[in-house]
Structure formats: structure tokens, C-alpha cells
Amino acid sequence: MEITKEKLLSFYETMLTIRYFEEKAVELFAAGQIPGFVHLYIGEEAVATGACANLTDKDYITSTHRGHGHLIAKGGKLDLMMAELFGKASGYCKGKGGSMHIADVNLGILGANGIVGAGQPIATGAAFACKYKKTDAVSVCFFGDGASNRGTFHESLNMASIFKLPAVYICENNMYGISNNQKNHMNINDISDRAAAYGMPGMTIDGNDVIAVYEAVKEAVKRARKGDGPSLIECKTWRHRGHFEGDPGVYKDPKEQETWVKKDPIIKLEEKLLEHKVVTKEEIAHLQEEAHGKIEAAVEFAKNSKDPSLDELLTDVYAG
Amino acid sequence: MEITKEKLLSFYETMLTIRYFEEKAVELFAAGQIPGFVHLYIGEEAVATGACANLTDKDYITSTHRGHGHLIAKGGKLDLMMAELFGKASGYCKGKGGSMHIADVNLGILGANGIVGAGQPIATGAAFACKYKKTDAVSVCFFGDGASNRGTFHESLNMASIFKLPAVYICENNMYGISNNQKNHMNINDISDRAAAYGMPGMTIDGNDVIAVYEAVKEAVKRARKGDGPSLIECKTWRHRGHFEGDPGVYKDPKEQETWVKKDPIIKLEEKLLEHKVVTKEEIAHLQEEAHGKIEAAVEFAKNSKDPSLDELLTDVYAG
Amino acid sequence: MTQMSYVEGLRDGIRIEMKKDSNIYMAGEDVGIFGGCFGQTAGLFQEFGGERIIDTPISETVIVGHAVGAAAAGLRPIVEIMFIDFIGVCMDEILNQAAKMRYMFGGKAKLPMVIRTTCGAGVGAAAQHSQSLEAFLTHIPGIKVVMPATPADAKGLMAAAIRDDNPVVYIEHKGLLGFKGEVPEGEYVVPLGKADIKREGTDVTIVAWSAMVHQALAAAEALAQEGISAEVIDPRTLAPFDKDSVLQSLEKTGKLVIVHEAVKTGGLGGEIAALVADEGFDLLDAPIKRVTAPDCPVPFSSYLEAHYLPSQDKIVKAVKEMF
Amino acid sequence: MTQMSYVEGLRDGIRIEMKKDSNIYMAGEDVGIFGGCFGQTAGLFQEFGGERIIDTPISETVIVGHAVGAAAAGLRPIVEIMFIDFIGVCMDEILNQAAKMRYMFGGKAKLPMVIRTTCGAGVGAAAQHSQSLEAFLTHIPGIKVVMPATPADAKGLMAAAIRDDNPVVYIEHKGLLGFKGEVPEGEYVVPLGKADIKREGTDVTIVAWSAMVHQALAAAEALAQEGISAEVIDPRTLAPFDKDSVLQSLEKTGKLVIVHEAVKTGGLGGEIAALVADEGFDLLDAPIKRVTAPDCPVPFSSYLEAHYLPSQDKIVKAVKEMF
Ligand SMILES: Cc1ncc(C[n+]2csc(CCOP(=O)(O)OP(=O)(O)O)c2C)c(N)n1
Ligand SMILES: Cc1ncc(C[n+]2csc(CCOP(=O)(O)OP(=O)(O)O)c2C)c(N)n1
Ligand SMILES: [Mg+2]
Ligand SMILES: [Mg+2]
């Protein structure tokens, strides 16, 4: 491993933070404290973590309905995120967006998105802006296996390739679009095979291996920053929970679920860290405690925040 | 050549008929007798002709804005087509559709279409119907290189492949979407490479060689009728005229135009017919005269037809 | 008659028609074993099998577009767009293909197809999963639009939509799916284009549809306490719109309030008001009022969302200002 | 002042803004050397180069969608959708992304982008290339919509649209592109949201926009011959709509006719009528009339198309029925 101990630890911290954020969301949703649709990222933490570790605040991402992990990995603030889930005035979107629309444009986070596939053109446009302005910033687009069947995928990757945009398209293939297994929604095994349709490089990697994700995205980002154009990276992964909270996931084979839960990306990294003596068990316990603490503080912040005031209903429709 | 003399002659007749129909449209448009947008198929006759020679009236096609050739090759009636170009009550669509919307549902012609790429989902649906009804009919979708960049392409081919629909997607790659050269609108040379993204066979052929088209589509149709699913066939070809009548085509390299005009599919077939002694020069002259006669008769029919009556304005909005 | 929920009603309508005609099939995202995002199609996969209840990829464009082709080729597709908010993804297929094909072909095509979708706010689903976009559809000649408010209408309008030879958009309100009521057993058809007087009254006419029918009925009840007799008209079919029922009611009442959950500007309420301000001008003895959502996206916060929605109280207030 | 055509006006507006701000670029199909389907962008490629005047693939979804991302990331895109008829292809990007992003993000995004497109029938382009679909757009809070009728407005509204920090849809009428008129030289801005009284009058108010302004003016001229003084109001911006100018005019005239080329049902005429039937009810002394296209697709036949279109004669007839 050529990755520094520091980096590995930061991966671990980020993944834990995401996991605990999501576990807290499970709890809060079940308790009726969070309204609306909540789509959780548990089991997929390695993708956002490994990918965003290559980015700075100047770089852009677009996220999805399953967005908490991307936002945390890109530097989103936990208290503002949590307050947004509660619909509070102190939230990222003043409570007007909710889980599916959290954004932090200053951090380059162009939003979670409730429309499957809608982030693809937006990320492409952000990449266009990076190139147009001659910065070396890049734009990373997260989306699912299901989203790769939308027309937006096709049009976006084609445009990015012609214009040699600094974009990285990261397909989080958790093998399901809601209840629809990949086998039934496309007739290929590797979504990265679609890159050839646009004349861009494509690769498939283990999305539960944060280091593999980090390395692959690193190459793609380097390529993009150099002006060599976009790439498509498919990360095979698995969501542990239902599509949204409340979905019992009857369409999944319990055995497959079991197999994949064993490949939990956090456990995988933990084992590696211990094996390579990057951390001790005690340090791990400490990091876990710390992460829990941050989440609790965020919940505290959210709970103590106020609802938006009524006149907020009609503001922010137009700028200026 | 395993193709019968009869078949070869019918290819030639069809191609001539298309050519003369289009040449007449040039003339009529210039004379101000045909309103609206007119997109001509001159130079691309081999594609529709070779493809449709594999079809019966039970099979479906969807066409494009550049649709006259497809319609004629699928058996569309010249007089009804010509009357439609004139907007006459006796036209295919009672004068309400015009060049871009000619259809003959009884012949399986699900319409020319003014929306680039819109025929792809429709052809997919017709293929779905063929399969659902357990007939052995197929659905053939014609579209351009430009249209292959629309989201409809992606979604249609993906759906057809998953459902193993009896569809044949025929891309008429004339290397331009209006003024935009293929080099600038996609980053690949062969559009058939896109088939791999859907797990379906793809091939690229000489679209100016009617026999090559016939043979390739024959295989694809056979495959579809057998229940083995869809194919993508790219036919490289060239439009001799502007995108629509009135476009001088300044964006084209005159040398390239010259090269391609030399590869005129009709001349190509004519030479082959003479070489293999399928016809004599005299017979060719006779066939040409006959084809001209049919077009003149169609024009006569159209000119002698009436405008639709005013109450037609509000009929046909709803069925029943 | 039997007691059924709205979702059971609409499913019953589908089931009865599907049993009769094997050319009817349903395609959409997660309509199979999953049973639909809100359970609307639960059991249909088990009953009719995977050849007729078909899960599609996330590809709304070809979901609707393929239905156009399949219908033109003789089938009777029912396709689902999970939320009406996604209608923009397949708008060209609705606007330029489904709605216009018959006309463009000079009457030589028939497109019997139903697009099922859900609308409505109130569940914290925010700006992209809560809209009421029926006005986009009623501005498109060539398609019909229905929005049932009760279990019986849900069933009867579904049957009518499936039997119709035109593209029909059938809009379910997600807040009504569990709503219970009396529903006729067996075959039951509510004709398209016919409004229903949900409550008779003499002082003011309230036109409302979908979930707003229930707010209007509650408002009418409250108004009755104050001596104002409100008539509540539910058009049920929005295109074609049954304007005669509104004009007739106005002959009695002379006052019109239109209620819809869609944002005000450009909502169908404007069209109805305009029809009346032309053809029923002499019947009016007060300004036409609209009670609608304000001109903004649907907010996530439950607190804001509650204020966003038109409600019984807002209707009562609007009516009382007329007296 | 100088004499210019409508298309020269709009191009001048673009050119002047583009020279000032390098963050402005234009992307669309055939906007480069081809110069646009109707020559709208002729010369811009030569002047600003291929980095700022960009030909795109036939991919309306990403054309508009990319503009959302580029605008959020600090650029000021102008994108072209060749015909407004194709708006369904990118409707999700307009409806759920461009229009809502700012609100959903709690005000933390700014989307300065212009979508240029053409509308209008009259050239035999049939059902999919002739529509007037502005009412779809005015039903979407978060975007602005302009439809100039004259060369000066074409220029001034273009400048305003480009300078605005919101998504603006700028709709050119293909029948007006060659229309000539006086245009101020140099920088010239027509503020968004301000109607223009194109002709003053005292007996009837005619509200019309885009090509219909000219039909309305011709009708007003004809009516003047018969002693009826018509005021012609051109809202120019349809969202936000300048309702005060209409109400003010009605204080004089008491009679309202609304003219638009879009089909009647669900057209913006309904919204305007509804506004007036509420807020201007007491000003009215006659039913509100609408002169519009009928509820059908645009027919190809030139004969039918001529009857499809609202015209000077139809306006005159509608007005005269009010007296
Ligand atoms: C255009 C659109 N279609 C359908 C939906 C409903 N929907 C929300 S998430 C989802 C599944 C997405 O699958 P995938 O892209 O694989 O992402 P995952 O949920 O697996 O992370 C669907 C169908 C939507 N939000 N937008
Ligand atoms: C959705 C859509 N976008 C743009 C257009 C305008 N347009 C008409 S034909 C055309 C070019 C089509 O190119 P291609 O698919 O290669 O077909 P060709 O004209 O070369 O036969 C364009 C851009 C349209 N009609 N529909
Ligand atoms: Mg997935
Ligand atoms: Mg082409």
C-alpha cells in the first residue's frame, strides 16, 4: 500500500461517520422524527469516501437520492445536514430541501437529487465550467446502476467525451434499482462496458474496497485535470437496507444479502488497518466513539433548531 | 450473388422510384408548390430499399423527418404520399401531416417523425406488440447518426435487449446531423460499437450497397423472428443534398461530397446489374421511364386533389 | 356495494379489465413483485404473471414511448410513471407522439393507452415528488386526463380510461390511496368527461378535484354551520372538461371558488375561471376566487408544507369573503 | 435609433452582452457555422469563436441540463432549443432542475441561464414544429419567460434575460424574425416583467404577445375605422406577468380580449382572464373573450393552418361582439 497512514485513517473516519449518520437516520425515521423519503447509503460508504478523497472544495460533485454519503465525504457539515433532514431552518437548505436536496454549492456539492439520472447533465455542465474557466477543477458524478439506463446517462457521457470535459462518472452498482435486479434492467454484466460507446475509458472495480476506489478515481481525476477527458468507473457494491426506509426488500435473495453484508466495506478496511498495524483495537474503539459523538452533536443541533419561519415559504423562488 | 434477378430488379426499381420522387420534390419545393420543411433522401436509397425488402406488410417500421424513402420502400403509395406533400385531402394524412408525418398504419408504417429520435421508442413498442402477440412480425427502426445521440436511443435499445424484442435498429449514418459532422458529435467512428452497451449484436456496413444492406438486415430480421432479440446495424451513407431544401450545405467539404456522389448507390447497383448482365441498357432506360411515369402520375393526382375541407381542422383529435 | 380503499378501487378497475382483454398489459418501474411504490399494483404480478405485469428499467422516455408504438400496433398498454413529477422525462412522448399521432396521421391511428401516475404533496416528499402537474396535460389536445377523488371514482374512471381509445393520463393522489368508501362490485364504469356533484348547495359553487374534493367537502360542512350552502363539483375528468355542470351550478349560486393543489399561476383553475368569465359572465355576482398552492416549489419542512397546501380553512375564508 | 430586423435585434442583444462578459457562452444544435436553423446566430461563431459558440449533439436533455450545472458553477450559458416543440425532451431539466434548484437549496444557488427557442405556426411546419407552448413554462415557478414582438423588444429583452440571475426562457417567433423596426443602438435593456402599451385606446383592452401583437394592432386599426378605440397591451414578459398594466387599462375600457397563438384550453389567456375575473371583476362590463388557436394540433395544409391561426379578422369579430 502506498497510501499514507493518515489517509487510511481519514478513510476510516469518513466511512464510520457516514455509517453512523445513516444508522441514526434509521432510528430517527422509525421514530417518526424525519419525514419524507429516506434512502440510506449503508454498505456503500467506500465509494463516496474513496472517490471524494481525491477532490478539493474547488471540485464539483453531483449526488443522488441516496446522497448522505457523498455529502459527508465531500466535506458536508453534519449538523447542517442533520438539521435539513429534520426540516429545520438551520439546515443546509433552510428546511426547504430535505434529504433528497441537500447541497453546499460553496463546497462544490451541486446537490442530492430526487430525479434519478438528473445529476448526470448537471455534473457535465459543471465539468464544462471547469474547462471553460481553464481551472484544473474536475466534476464527479455519482449515480446508480438504475440511473445508467436513463437517457441522461447517454447524452451526458457523449457530450463530455466530445468536449473532453474533466468529468468522472462513478456508477454505484448496487445491483438494484429499487426492486429491479441488474439482470432484468440491462443485458450486460459490467456497466463500464458502456464507456466504449462514447470513446472514453471505463473500468469496473470492487466498490467495497475503499482503496481500490481511491486509486481508480485518482487516475481518472488526474486524467481529467490534465485535459484528457472523462472516464466511467463502475463500483460494484450493495445496499444493506431497503431501497428507502420502510422497504423490507423482499425482492432480494437473503443469501446474497448475507454474502454481501460479510463484505461490509468498513469491516474490510478495519481488518486491513489492524492487519497492517495502522491502528490498534483501542484506537478503533476511540475513533468509533468520536464518530458517534459527532453524530449525536448533529442530532442535538438539529433538535434544538427551529422550524423555518412562514415567510420562508415564498423566498428563494427567484434570485435578485 | 445468391439474390434472384427478380429481387435485384425490384431493388433497382424501388431506388429509382425514391430518387425520382425526391428529385420531383426538389423541383416542386423550389417552385413553391410544397410548403414546410422537406428533407430528401437522395443518396441514401440503398438503405431503405435493402432493409425493407426483408419485410412484409405485417412488419412495422418507424421513419424519420427524412422519410420518403422508407415509406416508398415499405410499400407506401406514391399518389397518397405526393398528395400529402401538397397538403391535399386525398393525401395519406388528409393533408394534416405533411412530409414529416406520413404514415400508413395498415402497411405497418408508424410514421415519419419530426422529432429526431422519437421513432426509437415507438419502434420498440411495436416490437413489443409483435412479441406480446406471439406473431413472428418484426419492427425496424430507421434513424440517423445524429439521432443516435439522443436519450431515446439508449433507453430503446436497452429495453429491446432486456425484453428480447424482435427489433432491428438501422442507423443511417450520413455523417451529419444538419451541419454537425459525426467527428464533432460523437467520439467514436462506428456507431455500431454502441450495441455492446446493450448486449446486442452490432455491425457496420456500406449503406450505399443495397445488397450489403439487404443481406445484413436479412440476418437481423431472421434473428428477430426467431426470438433471439434485437440488433443494431449501421449503414454508412451520404446525403447528396442539403439537410433540408434550402440548405446550401456550406459546412460540407466539396471534395468529400464529390467522392460520395461518385459512390451513388443507384449507379453502383446499375453497374452491377449491367456487369452481371441482369439487365441491358435498354431495359434500364425503360425502367427509368416507367419510374418517371409513376412519379408524374402521382404529381398529377396530387395537383388534381382538393384542399381538406375546413371542418377537418377539428376532426381526428380524439378517436371515438 | 362494498367498502374499499381508493387504491383497492383503482386496482379492482385494472383487474376486471385485464381479465376481459388479454391485449391489456401493464409496464412500469417496480410494478411487479414490489407492487408499486405505494402498493398500487400489489398482487397483480401474482395474478397476471410477468408477461402482463412488467418491470421496466428506469427509462420513462421509452416507457411512454414504447406504449405509443404498442398501442398503434394493437395493444392496450397501461404504463406507470411513478410520480407525475417525472412527467418531464417523457413529455415529448406525451406531447408530440401520443397526443398528436392520430391527428397527424389524418385519423388513421388509434392509441388506446393509459398513463398511470401519482400526484400530491403532504408527505414530506419535497419539490420533486409532490407536484400537481395536471395543467401541463390539459393544455395538450389529444389526451384525456382524469383525477379521481373517491374509491368508487378511482375504480370507475380506471375502467373508462382503459376502455377509451385515446391516451388517458390517470392521476392518483398519494394522499388518498388509503381513503375508504363505498364502491360498486363487479364491472363499474364512470364515463369520462362527466363531473359529479359531490354535495349539493345553493349559495356558492366550489369546483375541486382529487384530494381537494375532501377539503372542499369539509369546508362546505363548516360553511353550512354558518348558514352558507356550498355546492361541491368534482369534474373528475379534467380533459375533456365538463363545463356545463359548472355553468348550471352557477345559475343557482352566482358565486364560484375553484380549488386545486397545483400552484396558482397557469393552473387549470385559470382555465375554468376564464370559461366562466366568458360563457357564464352574466351568471356571476362576485369575483371568481381561486384557492390554490402559492407560486413556489413544494417545501420539505412539514410546517411549511402544511401552509403550502390549500385547506378547508383557506376555502372557508375565501368563500366567506364573498358574502 | 437604427432600422433592424427582429433577428438582428436579438443577435445584437447577445453580441453586446457577450462582448462584456466572457462568462457568457452559447451552446446548441447548429448554432456555429450553420448560424442557427433560421440564421439567428449567423456571424457569432466568426466573432466569438468555437469556444464560446458551441455546436452540440442532438441531445436537448443534456443541452439544458449541462447549462444548469454550468450556471451553478459560475457561467452564464445561453442554450438553444431549436423549436419550442422539443421542450418536452428537456422538460425535466427545466421543471425540476433549473426552476427548483435555488429554492430546494434554500437560496444557495444562482442560475443565470437563458434558453432561447422559437415558436409559432404559419410556415407549413406542421404539428411538431409550430407550437406555442409558453403556458407550460409560465406554470413553473422559478423561471421567467419572455416573448418579444418587435425588433427593439427582441434586443432589449435579450439583454435583460442574459443579465438576469434566474433561468429565463426567451421565445422567438419564427414568423417575426424578418420583421423590421426601429431599435436603439448600443446597450439597450427592456426590463423583465414590464408590459408595453403598443397602442393606446379607450374602448376595449386587447392583450396579445409575440406575433399576435401585430394581428392585434392590425385589428385595432380596423376597429378604429369603425369607431372603436382599442388599447393593445403587450406583456412582453409572461412570467412574471405585469397584471397591473392590464387592470389599469381596464379601468378605462371595461372590456378585455386576450389573444394568443397557443391552443385555447390551458393557454396563458385563461390565467389572465382568471386574474381579471378576480381582481378586476368590478372593472368588467362584458364577458372576457379569448381569441386563440383551437384545441387541436397544428395542421400541415396551408389552408387549414391559415384557419387555425388567430387573426386580425377573428379579433375584430370578437371585439365587435362586445359592443
Ligand atoms: C426519473 C426518475 N424515475 C424514477 C424515480 C423513482 N426512483 C427513485 S430511486 C430509484 C431507483 C434508483 O436506482 P439506482 O439508480 O440503481 O440507485 P440506487 O437507489 O440503487 O442507489 C427509482 C426508480 C425517480 N426518482 N426519478
Ligand atoms: C429532438 C429534436 N432535436 C432537433 C431537431 C432538429 N433537427 C431536425 S433533423 C436534425 C438532424 C438529424 O440528424 P440525423 O439524425 O443524423 O438525421 P439526418 O438528417 O442526417 O438524416 C435536427 C437537429 C428535431 N427535429 N428534433
Ligand atoms: Mg442501484
Ligand atoms: Mg445524419
Image: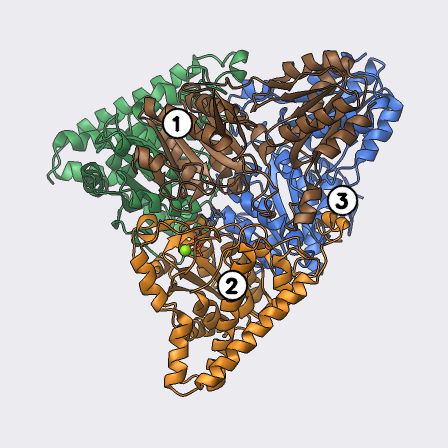
Chain colours: A orange, B green, C brown, D blue
Query: What's the distance in space between the residues labelled 3 and 1, CA to CA?
Result: 48 Å
Residue D218 seen: no
Give above or below for D55 relative to A163.
above
Give above or below for B255 relative to C234.
below
* Residue B64 picture location, percent across and down: 40, 35
Name the subunit of mark 2: A
Give a yes or no on whether discs 3 and 1 share a subunit: no
Asked if residue C110 lies left or right of residue C136, the reply is left
Give above or below for D70 relative to B216.
below
Q: Secondary structure at mark 2?
A: helix
The picture quadrant where one finds residue C79 is top left
Residue D290 seen: yes
Asked if residue C249 lies left or right of residue B315, the reply is right
**Residue B24: mark:** 1
Reading the image, the residue beneath label 3 is: D192
Query: What's the distance in space between the residues labelled 1 and 2, CA to CA?
Result: 68 Å
